[in-house]
Amino acid sequence: MNHLALAVSNQVRSTRFYVEYFGFAPEPEPREDGVLILHGATGFSLALGEIDEPVVLPPFLHFGRSAASPDDVRSFRDRIKADGLDIVEWWDEPDYVSVKFHDPDGYVIEVGWDEARPGPA
């Protein structure tokens, strides 16, 4: 996969979040349909479409990004914790380190490292 489209309640707030924590670069203006596209350094695109109704998510739904090392996950966890983000789950095992947290609309995002599936270098 190389893109994900999310319904968001506030496009500006969500754009700031994904730029700040994941380094996405937004296009200058939303498309004709109002969707704003953000581009990641690896070619991944995130489409943010603002909606008026509440975003309702099943509990199992989450998406994530691999980290290059266990320490990268720990540092990221420390950063989001210091910033007051809602941490959902934290694992720190010898072969698996993961933090799950909420974005502004309640989507659960995971940043993790798994010895069996190493992340980017």
Image: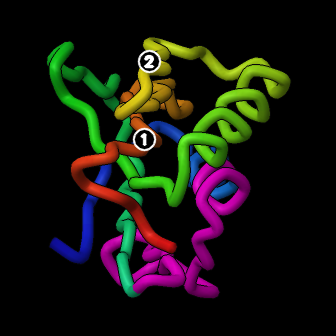
Q: Nearer the viewer, residue 23 or 89?
A: 89
Residue 113 location, quadrant = top left
Disc number placed over residue 112 in the picture, else none: 1
Percent x, y for residue 24?
Answer: 58, 71
**In which quadrant of the rendered image does the N terminus lie?**
bottom left
Looking at the image, residue 93 sits to the left or right of residue 10; the answer is left
Question: Answer yes or no: do the residues labelled 1 and 2 have beta carbons within 8 Å?
Answer: yes
Q: Where 55 sits versus 32, above or below?
A: above
From the viewer's perspective, is residue 15 above or below residue 36? above
Q: Disc 1 and disc 2: Cα gap in Å?
A: 9 Å
Quadrant of the image occupied by residue 78: top right
Name the residue rendered at 45%, 31% in the picture.
97
State the residue in front, 75 or 104.
75
Segment colored magenta: 17-42
Q: Which element carries disc 2, helix, strand or loop?
A: strand
Q: Give the x, y percent position of residue 96.
A: 37, 32
* Magenta highlight on residue 84: no
Query: Helix or strand or loop: what does disc 1 sit on?
Result: strand
Percent position of residue 39, x then y: 48, 80
- Please tell me how crowded label 1 is: few (under 14), some (14-19), or many (20+) other residues with Cα within 10 Å: many
Q: Is residue 20 magenta?
A: yes
Q: Is residue 69 visible?
A: yes
| Residue that carries the numbered disc 2 in the rendered image | 91
- Residue in the picture at 29% in, 43% down: 63
The vertical placement of 80 against 57, above or below, is below
34 relative to 72 in the view: left or right: left
Q: Residue at x 49, y 27 (%)?
A: 99
Q: Amino acid at mark 1?
A: Gly
Q: Residue at x 77, y 18 (%)?
A: 84
